[in-house]
Amino acid sequence: MKQGLNLLQQFAGTFLKDVNLGVILMNTHFELIDISDMACRLLGLVKEEVVHRPLEEIFANMPAEHQLVHRNILDGMVVRNHAISWTNNQERYELLVDSNVLRDDHHQVVGAYIMFKDVTNLRSLEEQVQRSDRLAMIGQIAAGTAHEIRNPLTSIKGFLQVLRKTLEDKGMDRECGYTEVMLGEINRINQLVSEFLLLSKPKHVSYDSVDISQVVREILPIINNEAILHGVVVQYESALDLPQVVADKELLKQVFLNICKNGIEAMGVGGQLTLTERLDMDERKVNIDIHDTGPGIPMFVVDKIFDPFFTTKAEGTGLGLSVCQRIIHDIGGNIRVSSKGYGTTFTVSIPFPQPLH
Ligand SMILES: Nc1ncnc2c1ncn2[C@@H]1O[C@H](COP(=O)(O)OP(=O)(O)O)[C@@H](O)[C@H]1O
Ligand SMILES: [Mg+2]
């Protein structure tokens, strides 16, 4: 019997060290009695510093919705699979929390435990699936309506141009100005519809061997132009002899333009946009970093920026990044974003094929 108890104690000690679960034990005074290594790591705590301290003190600086523990778990409140988000060192974790009281032989409450699993990867997978579902649906709707919008728009535009000419000939400058405004607005609708059409899988993509440096060089004048308008400086750090990737050149241009445009729009006068090409031989990828010195993207926004129609701009469509994402995913690449407080870097990674021997 004694040996059995020893073994159990031994196991409890090892368990808290080894197990890939967050475990916190507390007594009836709401003081932390023991904690698993994984919980320390994930919550950013040092075991020696928190043992025997009141939990309220340990988690004092946490906002209410991030509270892992409440005193009422000692009242017998049972929690199962309660989902919370936790942020530590700029990393965001999705946790599923269980908790319950511990009772002795006489049914007296002697403490409580909290256990949690880290389900960050599962959650982001789930979100990805939902997102691509939504994208597919929007794509279908977009493809159906975009053409229907475009055709009448083309004839309106045509007649407007005729009208403008007539007004011009008659010297009606003010009315001529109105038609200018109308034509500008029509172009905006057209542009929106084009972005729509890209969201639904475009039919006319043509994949080819593409030199990324060349693509960047071709769009650099456009980026520069936009940058000058905003008082921003552009720096381009090219890499020599990048391997070719398989992509649609025009779509690739659109991706870089979109991301650069976002960067420029995020910065004020005096900002700097840096494009850097990097070769990753291990992963067999060409990476393009697009870095801006803007204000960065707040953590609660960053999850949403690839969602169609998500925008924080008064005039934004919120389609830019979702289109970019679509285009890069279709060629087996990915777009990552890192924004830690100050400035933002978008990294476009595109795989390059194995050379033929
Ligand atoms: N470089 C950046 N810096 C800060 N915020 C950004 C940056 N790039 C994108 N964003 C955010 O992502 C949102 C979505 O971008 P996007 O899909 O291109 O749509 P839009 O540019 O029309 O708003 C933007 O509204 C902005 O809030
Ligand atoms: Mg944009």
Image (spheres, rainbow, N blue to C red):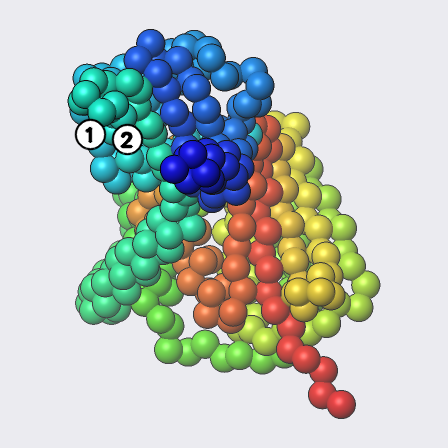
> Residue 297 in the image: x percent, y percent?
48, 34
> Does residue 130 lie above or below 2 as drawn?
below
Q: Determine the secondary structure under disc 1.
A: loop
Q: Verify CB contact (< 8 Å) between mark 1 and mark 2.
A: yes
Q: Is residue 282 left or right of residue 146?
A: right
Which image quadrant: the N terminus?
Answer: top left
When asked about the image quadrant of residue 26, the answer is top left
When asked about the image quadrant of residue 234, the answer is top right
> Residue 211 in the image: x percent, y percent?
68, 71
Residue that carries the numbered disc 2 in the rendered image: 99
**Residue sitting at the far front:** 1
What's under tag 2, amino acid-wise? Ser
Is the CB–ligand 1 distance for label 1 below 8 Å? no
Q: Nearer the viewer, residue 102 or 352?
A: 102
> Residue 39 in the image: x percent, y percent?
47, 32
> Residue 227 in the image: x percent, y percent?
61, 40
Q: Is residue 255 left or right of residue 26?
A: right
| Total number of numbered discs in the rendering | 2
Residue that carries the numbered disc 1 in the rendered image: 78
For the point 22% across and 25% down, which residue is it? 105
Q: Is residue 121 left or right of residue 283?
A: left
Which image quadrant: the C terminus?
Answer: bottom right
Q: Is residue 49 left or right of residue 150?
A: right
Residue 180's label in the rendered image is none
What's under tag 1, amino acid-wise? Val
